[in-house]
Image: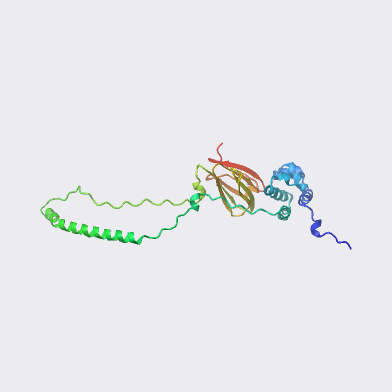
Amino acid sequence: MSIGNSPEDDRPSIGRALQQARIAAGLTVEEVSSSTRVRIPIVHAIEQDDFSRCGGDVYARGHIRTFARAVGIDPEPLVEEYDADHGGRPAPTPAAPLFEAERIRSEPRRPNWTAAMVAAIVAVIGFVGFTLFSGEDEPSSTAQIAEGSKPDKTAAKPTAPKPSDPKPVPSESAIAAAPRDKVTVKIGVSRDESWISVKDHNGRMLFDGLLLEGESKTFQDEERIDLVLGNAGVIELFVNGKKLQDRFEPGQVERLTYTKGDPEAG
């Protein structure tokens, strides 16, 4: 008695599914490459289930999503199949803290009641002494005025206490206070979702994963930050306190590098 293949065994591979969808949509490899900005050799490799030319798992997932949308099929089952075949998606690395000062906070001090009591006693003694001293001089001052002498107009007038300087109001956005001696990048997703990869100047991975609609992350380095943005058209990008104008298309994969200073200079 023979046992037939299961439905999952008959399901086409990722590359085969994308190729069939492309042919059904009446598109050539060149047209898919032009619309997705994925190079022609990589499109051919993906259709042959060869993802080694994509440059890593995060790029491979991005190319699969972009390819699937271009030929009109749902990318999620294909991405899930890719993750199952390649050991699953890595857990996102938490973003580096924006400012060291946010991590170091002093413990609240307890009030020193002993010092407060001593200060209060000294203040009371001083006030009583001042009152007694002023009372002894009061008759002579009154007599001088009654005799027609004019009070000295040059006497120092009591001055109102100088109001304390207002405390600085914290900035509404941490990105607005980005230090000039570092490179600071804030990535937000306005709609849909985007897969991103972020590295510092040493090549250390700061983040590798998905950002969903409404989420944002901020990264900072002493010299340089390297970005790979999938579905770049849905991303809002702030670099060194400056919002960059939207210039990417949905589904587009962008590789960017930013350093200190004006990101749009030069």
Judge left or right: residue 91 versus residue 41.
Answer: left
Number of labelled discs?
A: 0
Whether 113 is drawn above or below 233: the answer is below
The quadrant holding residue 244 is: top right
Q: Nearer the viewer, residue 106 or 38?
A: 106
Q: Residue at x 22, y 60 (%)?
A: 128
Estimate the x, y position of residue 19 in percent, counting from the top left. Answer: 78, 49
Camera-nearest residue between 221 and 239: 221
Tell me: 91 left or right of 148. Answer: right
- Residue at 36 percent of width and 60 percent of height: 112
Q: Quarter holding the N terminus?
A: bottom right
Residue, far top = 266
Judged from this view, the residue extending furthest toward the left is: 147
The C terminus, quarter of image: top right
Colour scheme used in the picture?
rainbow
x, y percent for residue 215: 59, 54
Q: Position of residue 62 (x, y in %)?
A: 68, 49
Furthest residue toward right: 1
Q: Nearer the viewer, residue 71 or 82?
A: 82
Outermost residue, bottom direction? 1
Where is residue 108? Give x, y as percent: 43, 58
